[in-house]
């Protein structure tokens, strides 16, 4: 994505063994990395392409300038005085913010998120949607929708109750309570809370660990966990069997068995 000081940019780099980790950096520090329409569209494109890129084994999402993401840039969106057609949100958001959250939760690659500073609204929901989020202890997760006079979106009412329970979800969504990184870890909203200067290293290490795992099996397990949240036990076990049938046909499965027999650490190749 090209540099534009007003619209912000999404920066992409590769890291890890064989460049198998895609690092996505939200770069709009002057606006605490709030997402402009071009940035959101770019993120949808990036995750869509990553889903079918066999060279990737993990994704790491972070922000620049000491903050993760201050949410969708509603100020810029509504500052020109023009009034969109009726139904604009219903037409547009399923293909932008909502699609982005869906991609993060459904992509077969593990997604790690590193959070410092603010994670607000859509930014908070991106952190909640990731498979593993490492947050600074003093980070602030905030869902200020009702404080702004409108109801929650981008998966907040689905993600929060499942991760932290209904009571805590209401505290964040109805009362607008801010939650620190330390509290978020205690509540189960994030994987880990560390000191601000440890976020980068901890998230990098976690992404590298996941990238060294059996990529196909990880993706199938992630999909099964998401499916099980809305399925019966029998349906979930049937889904597991279908996934097991696929994962047992991978080279990583054979390597896992060989490593077990030889009493050594497996060397998974993501195939």
Image (spheres, grey):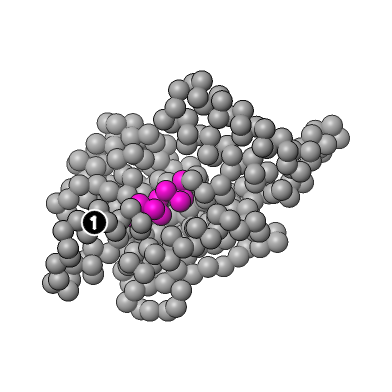
Location of residue 74 in the rendering, given as x and y in whole percent from the top left corner: 23, 63
- Residue 8 position (above or below residue 149): below
Give the left or right position of residue 161, taking residue 170 as reference.
right
Q: Nearer the viewer, residue 231 or 43?
A: 231
Residue 56 in the magenta stretch? The answer is: no
The residue located at (64%, 44%) in the rendering is: 216
Does the image show residue 193?
no
Q: Which residues are magenta?
A: 97-105
The mark tally for this picture is: 1
Residue 96 rendering spot, x and y as whole percentages: 35, 58
Within 10 angstroms of label 1, few (less than 14), some, or many (20 or more) residues? few
| Residue 166: x %, y % from top left | 29, 31
Give the residue displayed 39% in from the left and 53% down from the top.
99
Q: Is residue 136 left or right of residue 261?
A: left
Q: For residue 184, what is the image quadrant?
A: top left
Judged by its main secondary structure, the magenta piece is helix
Say which residue label 1 marks.
89
Asked whether the viewer can see residue 39, the reply is yes
**In the image shown, does 128 or 254 lie closer to the viewer?**
254
Q: Residue at x 29, y 58 (%)?
A: 92
Q: Is residue 170 left or right of residue 130?
A: left
Q: Is residue 77 left or right of residue 25?
A: left
At a point 57% along the width and 67% down the height, the residue shown is 13
Image quadrant where residue 241 sits:
top right
Give the image location of residue 115, x and y in percent. Answer: 43, 54
Q: Is residue 9 above or below residue 117?
A: below
């Amino acid at each position: 994505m090209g540099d534009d000081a007003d619209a912000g940019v999404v920066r992409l780099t590769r890291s890890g063994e064989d460049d198998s980790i895609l690092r996505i950096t939200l770069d709009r520090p002057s606006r605490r990395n709030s997402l402009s329409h071009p940035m959101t569209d770019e993120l949808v494109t990036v995750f869509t392409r990553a889903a079918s890129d066999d060279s990737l084994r993990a994704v790491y999402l972070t922000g620049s300038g000491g903050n993760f993401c201050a949410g969708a840039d509603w100020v810029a969106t509504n500052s020109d005085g023009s009034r969109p057609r009726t139904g604009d949100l219903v037409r547009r958001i399923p293909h932008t913010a909502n699609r982005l959250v869906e991609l993060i939760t459904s992509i077969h690659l593990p997604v790690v998120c590193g959070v410092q500073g603010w994670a607000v609204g859509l930014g908070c929901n991106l952190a909640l949607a990731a498979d593993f989020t490492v947050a600074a202890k003093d980070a602030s997760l905030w869902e200020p929708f009702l404080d702004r006079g409108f109801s929650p979106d981008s998966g907040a009412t689905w993600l929060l109750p499942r991760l932290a329970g209904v009571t805590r979800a209401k505290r964040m969504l109805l009362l607008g309570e801010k939650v620190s990184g330390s509290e978020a870890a205690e509540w189960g909203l994030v994987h880990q809370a560390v000191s601000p200067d440890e976020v980068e290293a901890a998230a990098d290490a976690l992404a590298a660990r996941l990238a060294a795992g059996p990529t196909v099996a990880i993706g199938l397990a992630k999909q099964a966990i998401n499916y099980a949240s809305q399925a019966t036990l029998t349906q979930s076990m049937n889904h597991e069997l279908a996934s097991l049938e696929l994962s047992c046909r991978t080279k990583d499965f054979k390597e896992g068995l060989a490593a077990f027999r030889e009493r050594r650490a497996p060397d998974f190749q993501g195939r």
